[in-house]
């Protein structure tokens, strides 16, 4: 199964989610692979240093990340966006993938009894290290829930 994570610049949220999911998948020997992209990303940029540090603090490797814009043709089995705004952006361009497009938190909560109305992951860009740490923890929790729901 292929998952595409999308945020704005592909330097923080979607990049962290991609790294987390791929490393969890590898450690559990799952047939899940993640990629990431950004609605305003340019090709070939790096993950932000605070995002990389937040990943490392949670025990994930932040090695080698290259930003990329949303591809012209989305073939992923599941498209997960950081916010509702990103989801709307994607669906405006690719209405045919509406049945497989959710926000990260929206999809993570699909199979949970206790749901939150907050289905957006805030942009930590240009914030404090503590904010990046909080966002990384929020993404990690959601990714764990996603992996659990997919592998049931």
Image (spheres, grey):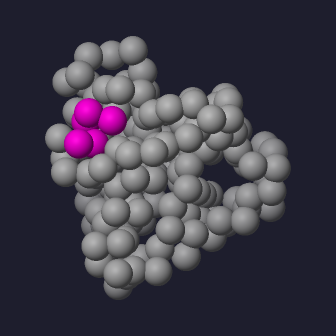
Instruction: Please state which of residues 46 and 35 is positioned toward the viewer in this rendering.
Output: 46
Q: Position of residue 132 (x, y in %)?
A: 29, 29
Which quadrant of the structure image shows residue 95? bottom right
Instruction: Please state which of residues 130 and 86 is positioned toward the viewer in this rendering.
Output: 130
Q: Is residue 107 left or right of residue 145?
A: right
Magenta span contains residue 54 = yes
Which quadrant of the structure image shows residue 2? bottom right
- Tell me: residue 79, above or below residue 8: below
Looking at the figure, which quarter contains the C terminus? Answer: bottom left
- Tell me: residue 112, above or below residue 37: below
Q: Is residue 76 left or right of residue 96?
A: left
Is residue 84 something that shows in the picture?
Answer: no
- Tell me: residue 31, above or below residue 102: below
What residue is drawn where x is 82% and y is 50%?
72
Magenta span contains residue 149 = no
In the displayed orientation, state which residue is furthest to the front.
64
Magenta region, residue range = 52-56
What residue is drawn where x is 65% and y is 65%?
76
Q: Position of residue 131 (x, y in %)?
A: 26, 25
Q: Position of residue 113 (x, y in %)?
A: 28, 67
Is residue 18 something that shows in the picture?
Answer: yes
Question: Secondary structure of the magenta portion, mostly?
Answer: helix
């Amino acid at each position: 199964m292929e998952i595409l994570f999308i945020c704005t610049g592909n330097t923080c949220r979607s990049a962290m989610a991609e790294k987390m999911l791929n490393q969890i998948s590898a450690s559990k020997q799952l047939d899940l692979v993640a990629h990431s992209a950004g609605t305003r990303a340019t090709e070939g940029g790096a993950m932000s240093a605070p995002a990389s540090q937040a990943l490392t603090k949670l025990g994930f490797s932040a090695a080698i990340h290259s930003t990329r814009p949303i591809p012209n043709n989305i073939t992923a089995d599941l498209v997960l966006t950081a916010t509702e705004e990103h989801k709307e952006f994607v669906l405006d361009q690719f209405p045919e993938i509406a049945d497989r497009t959710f926000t990260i938190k929206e999809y993570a909560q699909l199979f949970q009894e206790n749901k939150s109305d907050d289905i957006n992951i805030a942009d930590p860009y240009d914030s404090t290290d503590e904010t990046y740490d909080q966002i990384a923890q929020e993404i990690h929790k959601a990714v764990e829930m996603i992996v659990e729901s997919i592998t049931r």
